[in-house]
Image (tube, helix red, strand yellow):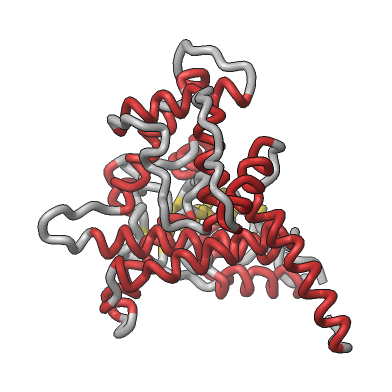
């Protein structure tokens, strides 16, 4: 038996038009607009689809209907083109129905085309994270009660877990831990929106860092020249000192960070500023550790990372002595 079109003649064409909810409605590609303007019919099952007002404003007549696969074939019979503006779910019932008809061999199928009308831009999923965080803050009994101070310890924990993933070289773990650190940023920004005296949002946070990055990279965004990492670092420190109104190279160094990291940071600032400041001559274990941290920094070694690596080796030796396998 020969396959036939429901109404005879050429089977026509079906275009499934997909859009991203993360891109502003109406910002469609040129091929999408061409398909919409040239179509004999444009259908959409969702009367509240965000694209509909913009399509109608552009003179596109859209019928709010949810056709079956058979009805769609009838609509495009005779060589007609039907564009289906897909809902957020992607019209699985319709596409499954078309697949069944195609597999039956009983009908002449129209040309089927999947046309992405808009694509997610890099970073678009961040909008989803902000939206999810909004809902969690509003509806979760635990999250709705959290404060900046209450979350502080989690920020430290997540930062250390990120460092561990980096040092372990575990790519899957790295991706997950980066997400956990990102969550801390978005969570704090969401809490900050509720401050009565000085509220700010995640957009303000992003805007601040964008401005800072551009200002501190004149060799990228301006006319300055920097050919080595050292020159970039020196310019960064000079610009930062002016921005913060700092009088000392030690200003801005968090004194509550781990001791080895603090000592190395101080030594780094001294070296970058070309200052001649000898280490204290006092005796004691603390001063010995200070000297070791300064030496490590001068040799380009992170003393905290070096100590962690040595400690892990020691841990493995302990477990081996205990007869405990990994």
- Residue 96 vs residue 72: left or right? right
Residue 155 placement (x, y as % from top left): 44, 65
- Is 173 situated above or below 238? below
| Number of numbered discs visible in the structure rendering | 0
Q: Quadrant of residue 109?
A: bottom right
Residue 3 placement (x, y as % from top left): 76, 66
* Quadrant (top left/top right/bottom left/bottom right) for the N terminus: bottom right
* Of residues 283 and 240, the one drawn nearer to the viewer in this rendering: 283
Q: Quadrant of residue 253?
A: top left
Residue sitting at x 76%, y 72%: 103
Residue 322 placement (x, y as % from top left): 84, 88
* Of residues 167 and 12, the one drawn nearer to the viewer in this rendering: 167
* Quadrant (top left/top right/bottom left/bottom right) for the C terminus: bottom right
Residue sitting at x 37%, y 42%: 252
Residue sitting at x 75%, y 68%: 312
* Residue furthest bottom in the image: 323
Res. 64 visible in picture: no
Residue sitting at x 36%, y 52%: 51
Res. 244 visible in picture: yes
Residue 195 placement (x, y as % from top left): 17, 61
- Is 309 situated above or below 145? above
- Residue 147 vs residue 19: left or right? left
* Of residues 206 and 155, the one drawn nearer to the viewer in this rendering: 155
* Residue furthest left in the image: 197
């Amino acid at each position: 038996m020969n396959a036939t079109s429901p109404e005879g003649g050429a089977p026509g064409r079906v275009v499934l038009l997909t859009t991203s909810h993360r891109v502003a409605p109406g910002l469609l590609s040129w091929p999408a607009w061409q398909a919409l303007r040239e179509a004999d019919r444009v259908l959409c099952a969702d009367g509240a689809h965000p694209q509909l007002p913009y399509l109608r404003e552009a003179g596109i007549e859209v019928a709010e209907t949810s056709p079956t696969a058979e009805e769609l074939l009838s609509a495009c019979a005779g060589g007609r083109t039907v564009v289906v503006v897909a809902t957020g779910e992607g019209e699985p019932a319709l596409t499954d129905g078309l697949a069944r008809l195609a597999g039956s061999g009983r009908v002449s199928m129209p040309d089927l085309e999947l046309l992405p009308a808009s694509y997610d831009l890099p970073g678009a999923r961040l909008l989803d994270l902000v939206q999810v965080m909004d809902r969690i803050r509003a509806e979760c009994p635990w999250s709705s009660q959290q404060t900046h101070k209450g979350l502080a310890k989690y920020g430290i924990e997540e930062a250390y877990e990120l460092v561990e993933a980096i040092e372990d070289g575990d790519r899957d773990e790295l991706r997950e831990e980066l997400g956990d650190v990102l969550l801390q940023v978005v969570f704090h920004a969401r809490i900050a929106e509720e401050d009565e005296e000085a509220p700010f949002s995640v957009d303000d946070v992003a805007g601040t860092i964008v401005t800072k990055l551009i200002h501190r990279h004149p060799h990228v965004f301006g006319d300055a020249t920097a050919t080595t990492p050292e020159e970039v670092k020196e310019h960064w420190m000079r610009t930062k000192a002016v921005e913060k109104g700092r009088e000392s190279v030690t200003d801005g160094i968090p004194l509550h960070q781990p001791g080895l990291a603090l000592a190395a940071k101080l030594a780094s600032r001294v070296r970058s500023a070309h200052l001649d400041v000898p280490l204290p001559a006092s005796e004691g274990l603390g001063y010995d550790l200070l000297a070791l941290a300064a030496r490590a920094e001068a040799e380009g070694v992170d003393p905290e990372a070096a100590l962690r690596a040595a400690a892990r080796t020691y841990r493995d030796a302990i477990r081996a002595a205990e007869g405990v396998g990994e």
